[in-house]
Image (cartoon, coloured by chain):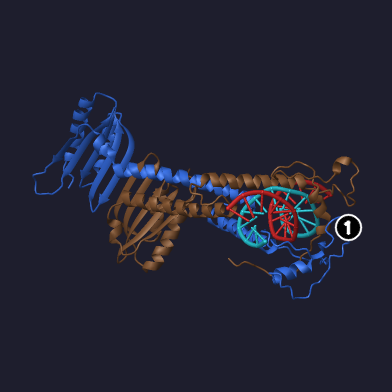
Chain colours: A blue, B brown, C cyan, D red
DNA sequence: CCCGACACGTGAAAC
DNA sequence: TGTTTCACGTGTCGG
């Protein structure tokens, strides 16, 4: 339960003058001054003799300042999503944590965006090996296999055909070569299917490129339509 | 923000007793400056008649609390890059601004990333309806659902999450709405999964948008990690 | 001179 | 009962 306001249920009304001075701040206290404060100067007179209504000039200003600060803390609490405790300290702490998280998140997002925007895998491959089947036939797209070396034992494989049934066969072929699929992208659209694999295959690059490409070509080559 | 938020009923303040205790508070000058107080207490039996060491139960506790709060404000000022003024209030204000800016930046980056991941299909839709879960958490991507109306009963649906296990649930949800999937694109990458559907759902567009989005949100929202 | 900012101790309320 | 948190008024310092 948030601390709403001080409910003055007690019957002790000592500083009505304060209230009055606050209500009509500015010192033009024309209102009825309660003139309470009959506490009798516990200090024994050595203190301020006229301490009864010696209101400091900053009273209202300080009150405003406090209000601004509190309002700011409230606003800060508003923008922070996860508030552990309705407290000033926890609010500040959570705000700090949130700012740090947000900064890290921004950094990560920028990094990922750069990676995604770069799509550096195309430029990474030193050589590209692609092959198109039946490119001369009347059908616009019959089958397509693209194999791109990315690095040590890493390849990018793109399969494009008109039927998704070859997907299992492609997987089996990759399995027969002990290929590890680290990433997979599949797109189907009105009967066309395109799959892009990131695979890791141990073995000589030239041999793998030739054999795997041949095998996949034979798979995609089969008439599916 | 209104300066005075409420009309306090009354205030009581016993200034007489604490003012003297303030005057001769016992050393431990933490924040105070030079503050030489020659109250003559060196003579031992001072003339302070009223409770020279007026017992304050939580004097040190309050002091520590202030210290913690101040330290927190200091830390908050540390993480905020641009500080306009060396003041508590401005510190909080700048922190709020910074948080808002960071949140907007995160949102923008996520949007850019989504755009980068997707293609121009987003621009096809007349209206876009997207939603991000736990955008304020530290994990860069928690769950994302985007539903874009493409035409009569046609929508583009993008699901992004960290685990592919929700795929079946999404399919079931779509089936429960008699959605016809005309196109599907799925991408997995190191635990992240993104699926883009072209679906056809009969029904009022607004209702479908709201309900389906809510349902998919509830599916993607579940913690998978 | 005053005004803004801050720390201080304290009473009271909330936990 | 205890502790912690809060708002309050005031003194003081610096511009």
Q: Residue at x 91, y 43 (%)?
A: B45
Residue A8 place in picture, x, y as percent = 77, 65
Question: Residue A12 location in percent, x, y?
Answer: 83, 65
> In this rendering, would B174 be left or right of D11?
left
State the residue at coordinates (83%, 46%): B39
Q: Residue at x 45, y 59 (%)?
A: B214
Front residue of B224/B61: it is B61
A87 left or right of A104 in image: right
Image quadrant where residue B89 sits: bottom right
Residue D12 at x, y = what percent?
A: 71, 50
Name the chain letter of the residue that bears numbered label 1.
Answer: A
Quadrant location of the N terminus of chain A in the rendered image: bottom right
Horizontally, residue A169 falls left or right of residue A225, namely right
B118 relative to B12, above or below: above
In the foreground, B194 or A49:
A49
**For mark 1, does the 10 Å Cα neighbourhood hold few (<14), some (14 to 19), or many (20 or more) residues?**
few
Q: Is residue B141 visible?
A: yes
In the picture shown, does residue B199 fall above or below B137?
below
Residue B95 image position (x, y, % from top left): 53, 52
Query: Residue at image x 35%, y 61%?
Result: B128
Q: Is residue A84 shown to the viewer in this render?
A: no
Q: Disc 1 designates what residue?
A: A45
- Tell me the element at label 1: loop
């Amino acid at each position: 339960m948030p601390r709403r306001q001080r409910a003055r249920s007690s019957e002790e009304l000592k500083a009505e003058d304060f209230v009055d001075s606050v209500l009509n701040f500015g010192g033009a206290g024309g209102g009825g001054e309660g003139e309470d404060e009959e506490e009798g100067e516990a200090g024994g007179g050595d203190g301020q003799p006229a301490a009864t209504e010696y209101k400091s000039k900053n009273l209202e200003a300080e009150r405003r300042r406090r209000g601004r600060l509190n309002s700011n803390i409230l606003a800060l609490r508003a923008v922070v999503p996860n508030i552990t405790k309705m407290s000033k300290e926890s609010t500040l702490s959570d705000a700090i944590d949130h700012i740090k998280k947000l900064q890290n998140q921004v950094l990560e997002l920028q990094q990922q965006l750069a990676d995604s925007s770069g799509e550096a895998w195309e430029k990474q491959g030193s050589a590209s090996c692609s092959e198109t089947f039946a490119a001369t036939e009347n059908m616009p797209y019959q089958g397509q296999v693209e194999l791109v070396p990315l690095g040590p034992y890493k390849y990018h494989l793109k399969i494009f055909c008109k039927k998704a049934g070859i997907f299992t066969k492609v997987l089996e072929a990759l399995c027969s070569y002990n290929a590890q699929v680290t990433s997979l992208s599949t797109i189907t659209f009105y009967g066309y299917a395109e799959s892009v694999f990131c695979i890791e295959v141990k073995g000589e690059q030239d041999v793998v490129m030739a054999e795997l490409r041949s095998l996949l070509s034979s798979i995609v080559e089969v008439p599916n339509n």
